Image (cartoon, rainbow, N blue to C red):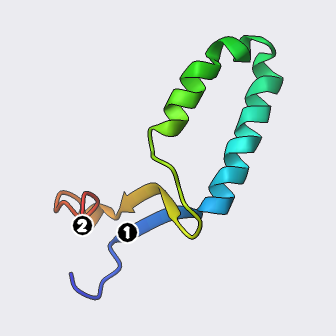
Amino acid sequence: MRGKIVGMLLSYSWRSKHKEEGKTGWLMLKVLGFDFLKRLPAFISARSGGGKLEEDDYYISNVAVYPEFRGKKIGKA
């Protein structure tokens, strides 16, 4: 498998992730209205689960392994 492309990673810079979190918060407020305030503690808890990103860090959003390479613990690695 050395030298072969076996899948893909989707990642965001710390700055992009911060902007997307802000947009998500505003969208949730728009859709849920004041009910969003009731759900805010759960939203904050879910957001903090991934740890804090520092400047120049990247957040891995998705990992995909092509079907012919699955089951070899590539995604886990």
Instruction: Give percent across and percent down for residue 59.
Output: 51, 58
At x 22%, y 86%, the residue is: 2
Whether residue 57 is situated above or below residue 47 in the rendered picture: below
Question: Hey, what amino acid is under mark 1?
Answer: Gly
In the figure, residue 15 lies in which quadrant?
Answer: bottom right
The local secondary structure at tag 1 comes to: strand
The local secondary structure at tag 2 comes to: helix
At x 58%, y 29%, the residue is: 44
Foreground residue among 61 and 14: 14
Q: Give the spatial CA distance, label 2 vs label 1.
A: 8 Å
At x 45%, y 65%, the residue is: 9
Dividing the image into 4 quarters, which one contains the N terminus? Answer: bottom left
Do residues under tags 2 and 1 come within 8 Å of each other at their CB atoms? yes
The residue labelled by disc 2 is: 69
Dividing the image into 4 quarters, which one contains the C terminus? Answer: bottom left
Residue 58 placement, left or right of 33:
left
Instruction: Give percent across and percent down for residue 45.
Output: 51, 28
Q: Residue furthest bottom?
A: 3
Question: Hey, what amino acid is under mark 2?
Answer: Phe
Residue 38 placement, left or right of 27:
left
The residue labelled by disc 1 is: 7
Whether residue 17 is situated above or below residue 37 in the rendered picture: below
Whether residue 67 is situated above or below residue 40 in the rendered picture: below
Foreground residue among 69 and 59: 59
Instruction: Give percent across and percent down for residue 11.
Output: 53, 63
Instruction: Give percent across and percent down for residue 39.
Output: 63, 16
Foreground residue among 24 and 10: 24
At x 25%, y 57%, the residue is: 76
